[in-house]
Amino acid sequence: MQSLTVRPAVCARPMGARVAARPAARPSRVVMMSAPKKEAIEAAIKEAEESCAGGASGECAAAWDTVEELSAAAAHAKAASSSTDPLEDKRVNEYCEENPAEPECRVYDE
């Protein structure tokens, strides 16, 4: 009769060791918000001035932080809406309509 040799299972970690579960991949979300209206910024400024009328306080600082956030959001929205393509720039188009022979305005066919 042949004897059988039993080997222990080869394992990279000791018995009883816990393995951390990987978090499930979350789908990414992009939230687009519209720019705050000018009236909202003006109302926030008025509220900040009123809250600071009695002197500097945490409420006053928070109100001006709100004004800053609204102003920054409006500036970012304005920058994002403007084109970064020089060929779509209104000033360039006007210049090229007036000066079509200039090197900057030449259009080459392929």
Image (cartoon, grey):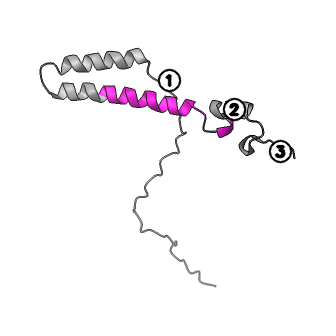
Badge 3 element: loop
Camera-nearest residue between 103 and 36: 103
Q: Which residues are magenta?
A: 66-87
- Identified at 40% across, 59% down, the residue is 18
What residue is rendered at 31% in x and 19% in y? 44
Q: Main secondary structure of the magenta part?
A: helix
Spatial CA distance of label 3 from label 1 is 39 Å
Query: Which x, y percent locates residue 40?
Result: 38, 17
Circle 3 or circle 1, nearest the eye? 3
Q: Amino acid at mark 3?
A: Tyr
- Three-letter code for the amino acid on which mark 1 is drawn: Ser
Mark before the other along the chain sequence, 3 or 1: 1
Residue 47 seen by the camera: yes
* Quarter of the image where one finds residue 6: bottom right
Q: Return the mark for residue 93.
A: 2
- Where does label 1 land, which residue? 34
From what the image shows, is residue 94 above or below residue 53?
A: below
Judge by depth and name the residue closer to the eye, 22 or 57: 57
| Any part of residue 31 in sight | no
Answer few, some or many: residues within 10 Å of disc 3's Cα (few below 14, many 20 plus, some between 14 and 19): few
Q: Is residue 73 shown above or below 14? A: above
Is residue 77 located in the magenta-colored stretch of the structure?
yes
Residue toward you, 50 or 25 = 50
Q: Decide: marks 1, 2 in contact (CB < 8 A)?
A: no
Q: Residue at x 56, y 30 (%)?
A: 81
Image location (x, y in percent) of residue 52: 18, 22
**Percent x, y of residue 99:** 73, 35
In this orientation, which residue lies closer to the viewer: 13 or 90? 90
Q: Which dot marks residue 108?
A: 3
